[in-house]
Image: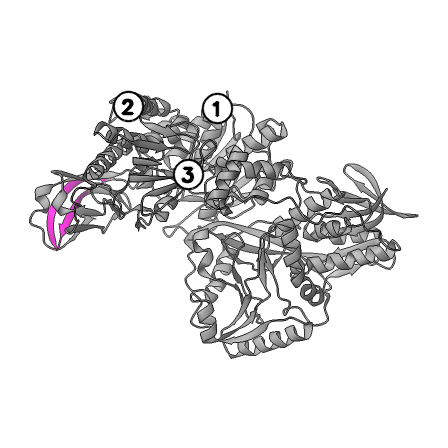
Amino acid sequence: MYDVIIIGAGIIGNFIARELSKYELDILLMDKENDISNGATKANTAIIHAGFDAPNGSKMAYFNVRGNPMFDQVCDELGVPFKRIGSLVLAFDDTDLKTLKVLYNRGLKSGVPKMEILNRDQVEKMEPNISHNVQGALYAKTAGIIGPWELAIALGENAIENGVELSLNTEALNIDKTSNGYNVFTNKGKTEGRIVINCAGIYADKLNNMVSHNKFRIIPKKGQYYLMDKTVGNIVNTVIFQCPTEKGKGIVVTPTVHGNLIIGPDSEIIEEKEDTKTDSHRLKFVAKVASKSLPNIPFDKVITTFAGIRAEPETGDFIIGEPEDAPGFINVAGIKSPGLSASPAIAEYVVNMVGGINNGLVKKDNYNPNRKKIIRFNQLSNEEKNELIKIDPRYGKVICRCETITEGEIIDAIHRKAGATTVDGVKRRARPGSGRCQGGFCMPRVMEILAREQGKDIEEIVKDSLDSYILTGKTK
Amino acid sequence: MNYDLVVVGGGPAGLAAAIRAKELGVMDILIIERDNELGGILNQCIHNGFGLHIFKKELTGPEYAKIFMDKVEELGIDYKLNTFVLDINDKKELAVVNSTDGFFSIQAKAIILAMGCRERPRGAINIPGTRPSGIFTAGTAQRFINIEGYMVGKKVVILGSGDIGLIMARRLTLEGAKVEAVAEIMPYPNGLKRNIAQCLEDFNIPLLLEHTVIDIIGRSRIEGVILAKVDEDRNVIKGTEKHIECDTLILSVGLIPENELSKSAGVKMDPLTSGPLVDETLETSVAGIFACGNVLHVHDLVDNVTKESYKAGESAAKYIKEVGEKKKIKDNIVHLYPEKGVRYVLPQYLDIDNLDENINLFMRVDNIYKNIEIIVETNGKVIKKFKRNQLFPSEMESILLRKEDLNNMTGNKVSVYIK
C-alpha cells in the first residue's frame, strides 16, 4: 500500500512527485503513456507567464504569480534550460491600448512585479522586426521561456532518485474507495494508496467521476503550432503576445530555450481527447494572425508543425482540492494555461494538502534536490570538449549533425533514472532529431544505440508509444 | 595541425576532388568524413546505373565508390573517419572532433566543401495530420533496408517522385512490400525518365501526378493517408480526396544542399541553388574555399558530380600553388543570371581574365519545354543559342561556351533564358 499514488506524469504529476519525495512517503507515479510528459507537457508554447492575464482572485492568477519566481531555483537544481527574456503584449489600436492598461492593472492587483507600458519607439527598439503598426506594449520582465518536457523529465528523474516509484504504460481503469484509501485498478492490476492525486490532464474528469458525485468535465482544446529553424530564432528577443480581443487571445511568437522560433497556438474545442492532428487550414490562420505582430516571418524555415491539447475545465479555473465526498482524493485538474507557470506553486500547495491529510510530513534526511549534471557537448568550451573526450571518447562521436549531439549524450539520456527507451524519448532528453533534418540522418543511429544500450533487438525499438513500431522485420 | 588541402566530406564529390588535387601535386591532403567509411551515400545505393558516362559501364553505388576509395588508398591520401567538422572560419581554420583525437583545429591553405545534401523532411513541406511512426524520408528507408537489413513497412505510399523515391519504390517491391502509389504534386515527375520506366512502369506502380498527401491517419503507427488532386496553383480540388490504407509513407520531396559549415565560413549563398555562389573554378566568395557535388547544387547523376569535383580539385591545386605568389586579382567578373524558364545557372560568376577555352554552364529549367532554344545573352545581344528538343526540370542541362564567345561582350551581366 502506497502512501500516495499520483496518476499522470505530466508537469504537474512530476512536480508533485518531486516535492513529495522530500518526505518519508511511499509514492507511486503512474502514467498510461510510454514516457513521462507525453501529453500537454510536450506540446505547448513553453513559456513562463508573468501572471497578469488570469482574472484577479482566480486560482490561475494566484498560482501563476506565486509560481513564476520559483523557476530559477528548481531549474538550477535540475539543470533545466530556462531564460527570463520578458514578454510584450502588443497593442495595434486605441482599443488595444486601453486593454494594455486593463492588463497592467490586473497584473498589479494580482501582485505581478516589474511591468511597464512601453510606447511605440521603446517597443521598436526592443524588437526591431516588429510590425510598424504597433502602438505600444505591456512589457513584463519576469516572463520567461523554458523546456517544459525537460523540466518534467528532470523532476521525474529527481523524484525517482529520491525514492518515488514510476510505472509507465499503466492506465487507471477504475478507482474504488476503501476504508483507508483507494484501490486503483490498472491494466497491470490493482494498487492501493491512502491518498490519490489526480493529475490526469485531459482525463482528470474521468478519474474524478469514478470516485465523486461532484462531477465535472474537462474540455479538450487543441492548439496548433509552427516550429522554425534556429537560423530565425533571433527574429524576436522576447515572448510576443497580442492584445486579447473579442476575436481571441491572438497568436504568440517566441524564441525557444534552444534557439528555435515557436508560433502558435490557435484554439479549437475538439471531440476526441487525443486528436493531435494538424491541419493546413488552421495553421494558415495561425500564420496569418502571427504576421500581424511580425510581418516578415520566413515560413520557409518551418522545421515542423504540431498540435497540443489543453485541459480546459468547464468551471473556467483550475480545479484543485478534495471533492467533499472523496477525502484523500486530490484533484489537480483543468490545469490549462498558465498551468506550466503555476506548476511549482501548485505542487507546493498540494504538498501542504497531503500534509494535512497525513497529519504532518516527516522530512527525509537524505533528500537530494540536485540532478547529476547533464553535459551538453555543443555548449562546452574547446578545452572542456577535449578533456571530456579524453575521459569518455563517446563524446567525440557526433550522432546528430543538425544539433551537434554526441553519442555520449544519448547514452547518458538512456541510462538516467526515468531514462529514454524510445526514439522520441531520446529526442526529448538529448535533442537528436530536433533539428532541421528532423532525424532523417540520425534516427537509424539513435535506434542502434538504444538497442545496444538496452540489450534489445533493433526491431523492438519504437518511436514513442509501445505500438509505434518502426521496422517490420528483416529483409529477404 | 596544418594541411595544404582539407576536403570536408568523403562521398563521391570529396573523393574525386582529393584525388585530382593529389594527382596535380598537392602533397598534404586530408579528407574528413563523419561516417565510419568513405563513399558517402553511394554505399547505400546498391542499384546499378552509376558510371555510364564516366566509365561507360553500369556500376552499383558501392562499386562506383570503390574505384575512388581504392584510388585514395593508392595515392596515399590521408583521411579521418567518424570525424565531424564543427566549424570553419573565413581564415580557413576548421574546428574538428572525433573520439580518438578529441577536439582539434586544422589550418588549411585551401578547403573543398563536399558535404553533400540532406533530404527535406515532413515538417518542411507541412504535411498535416497525426505524427505516428512509419514516415521515412526515402534515403533513411534506403539506409535501413540496404545497410541495416531491415524492412520499414508492408503497404507503402510514396510522396514525391524524386529519384531516391522511385528507386525505393522498386526496392520495396522487390522486398515484398506493396507500393500503392507514388504521388507527385507537380504535373511532371521529379525523377529521371529511366527511373520512371524501370522502377514504376515495370512494376505497375501507379504514378499520380498533381496529387499530394493532405492528411496522415494513425496515432501510433501510420494507418493511412488521404491523397487528393491539386489544381494548377497546387490547391486541393475538393471531392478528389481518397483514403489509402498504408503502414508506411516514404517522402521523396527534395534535397537541400547542406551548407551550415559553408555559412559559418562566411561563404555567400545562392538562394536558387541553396548552395554557394561560385565562379568557373568553383571557388566560393571566400578565396581558397571551393565547393563541388551536391553541396553546390543537387545533381541527378554521380558522373556529373565526379566531373565537377575533378574541376574543384584542379582549382584548389592551382590555388595552393599560387598562394605566396602574386595573388591573382579578380577584377573582371561577369555575373550570370537565370531568366525566363531557367531556375538556376551555375557557375554564377565568370572571371573573364582567367577563363579556360571551354566554359561549361549547368542549369535547370522550371517546367517541361519542347523544341526550344536556350539563349545566352548579354546587354540585349545574343551570344549563343542552343537548340533542344525537350528539357525537363528533373534533368540537369549543360551548355558549352567558348572563351571567344565572351570576347566582345559589353557590361558584366550575362543572362540565360528559354525561347
Label 3: chain letter: B
Q: Secondary structure at mark 1?
A: loop
Amino acid type, mark 3: Phe
Label 1: chain letter: B
**Which residue of the protein is positioned furthest toward the right in this rendering?**
A179
Query: Is disc 3 in contact with disc 2, using a CB cutoff of under 8 Å?
Result: no
- Quarter assignment of residue A138: bottom right
Same chain under badges 2 and 1? The reply is yes
Q: Which of A80 and A261 lies nearest the eye of the viewer?
A: A80
How far apart, in angstroms, are the residues tagged by discs 3 and 2? 25 Å
Q: Is residue B216 left or right of residue B311?
A: right
Same chain under badges 1 and 3? The reply is yes
Estimate the x, y position of residue A117 in percent, counting from the top left.
55, 76
Q: Visible in this render: residue A45?
A: no
Q: Looking at the rendering, in which quadrant would you find the N terminus of chain B?
A: top left
Q: Secondary structure at mark 3?
A: strand
How far apart, in angstroms, are the residues tagged by discs 1 and 3? 44 Å
Mark 1 vs 3, N-terminal side: 3
Instruction: Identify the residue position indicated by label 2 in the image.
Output: B75
Instruction: Identify the residue position indicated by label 3 in the image.
Output: B104
Amino acid type, mark 1: Glu
Q: Find out whether residue B384 is within the magenta segment.
A: yes
Crowding around mark 3 (Cα neighbors within 10 Å: few <14, some 14 to 19, many 20+) is some
| Residue occupying image coordinates x 15% and y 41% | B386
Stretch in magenta: B372-390
Estimate the x, y position of residue B40 in percent, counting from the top left.
38, 31
Q: Main secondary structure of the magenta part?
A: strand
Mark 2 vs 1, N-terminal side: 2
Instruction: Identify the residue position indicated by label 1 in the image.
Output: B175
